[in-house]
Amino acid sequence: MQTPFYDIHKSLGAKIVDFHGWKMPLQYSGIVDEHVNVRTNVGLFDVSHMGRFEIKGQNTLPCLQKLVTNDLEKLADHQALYSPMCYQDGGIVDDIIAYRVAHDHFLIVVNSSNRSKDLKWISEHSKSAHIEDITDRTSLLAIQGPRACDVLQKLVGTDLRSVKPFHLVNEEIDGIECMLSRTGYTGEDGFEMFFDSSRIEVWGKLMEYGSIYGVKPAGLGARDTLRLEAGLMLYGNDMDENTTPLEVPLKWTISFDKKQEFMGKKALSNIRPSRKLVGFEVTEKRIARHANKILMNGLEVGFVTSGSFSPTLRKSIGFCFVPVDVLQNQLLQIDIGGKHYEAKVTSTRFYKRKLR
Amino acid sequence: MFAAKKRIVSELKFTKEHEWIKTEEDGTAIIGISDFAQEQLGDIVSIELPKDGGFFRQGQTMAIVDSVKASSDIYAPISGEIIEVNEGLVEKPEIINQSPYDLGWIVKIKPSKMDEFESLMTKEKYDRYIGEIK
């Protein structure tokens, strides 16, 4: 599968990789260069591979409230929130962002790897609402970085500084209808832009108006290093159907006292996790990677879920599962290629952007 | 102190694992990885170098590079003893990406079996080889 921007990525010389069946740009100028540019200026990402569903009908809100752990009643129109969806046993189906257009109209964005699973899951549990997979007829771009607002402001009339985080606004870019949300997966300020999949010229407009702000295209490689620094998790790496939101830092997304019963509530109320996801920094020079074993006092106690290089900290960082009683700053060993390297337990949040 | 100088790439010999090697006038040899290798790896962010005095047989792992996305072993193109390593790469491993044949040299060795050079590829053969595997 290809996004509508595939030819653009090829013409920019991107290294293309297979990502769950999608031919996506891994990098253009280089992962580190693109990462640093997002933190310093602004980067443009094609994230059209993510699954997008539209749910309509008067039962939309109650149906979704049953599926997500977070409380959608908190949302005003034109506001979004992040939540896992759980199975009855508390395991995570997927983590999603739910955008409330109106009480009877929601847009859901899901991980591309879970698109058909999620569509089936939501459909089975939303029999009285109308769900449509709009992935193919829409595009999704993300513009992220301290200059993202400056770039997009040149193209739209709404005062973007007044759009609060996780809020939406309907706009037009060069006459093209676009829904903008102040969301992202990088830890920087920025917007995600939803529009018709035939209007690929939006990419060119953003690159053109962004050039004085130093805009560069950014691929999946930088997307991964950015989200890791920002403490954001990736389904499939950091969580899966055998993980509950109590074990990874998602307890804050569970609204135990929301009015509606939700899938997994009973299980989550009773589970006492024995492991937890923490951050780590490797104190030596090697890069820790997914599935590397974590050892303490020579005993295997967990494993790396996400591991990579942090261009901001200039060292290897990641997330790993450890027993619940492990403390920050404790030292552990990571088995990388059969040798043990020392690492330090940290928070999962390695980077916090400066507020302008 | 060994100083990096501009190497004539056509004089280098190559391995199937994308290392290059150049013999010096004093009988020692310098080793690095090819431009194709650094380009395939992407941004190199760390390198684990061998110690001076270490002996490696042809084909043995003598160093490990980490790029953002993957780890890659660097194999000894011929057998020999490490007499010097490019310490500067520890702080700035990206030099390998920027200058794979000159400033990004990795180790200097004293070869122990000169006839092992016969098994290596000329630049011409190596270019054809990478053309096939691309």
Image (spheres, rainbow, N blue to C red):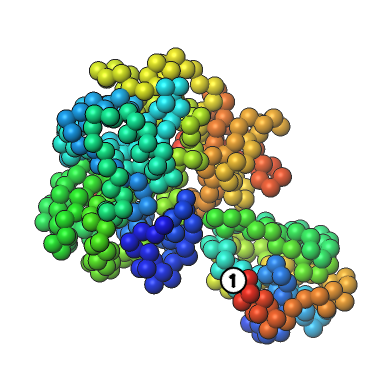
* Quadrant assignment for the C terminus of chain B: bottom right
In the picture shown, does residue B44 fall above or below A287? below
Residue name at image x 11 percent, y 56 percent: A157
In the picture shown, does residue A246 fall above or below B115? above
Residue name at image x 37 percent, y 36 percent: A120
Query: Which of A307/A92 is in front?
Result: A92
- Label 1: element kind: loop
Residue A102: quarter of image: top left
**Of the residues shown, which amino acid type is indicated by label 1?**
Lys
- The residue furthest left is A157
Disc 1 residue crowd, few under 14, some 14–19, many 20+, Cα 10 Å: few
The image position of residue A176, as x and y in percent, is 16, 60
Query: Which of A333/A83 is in front?
Result: A83
Residue name at image x 14 percent, y 53 percent: A171
Residue A203 visible in image:
yes
Residue A341: quarter of image: top right
Q: Chain of mark 1?
A: B
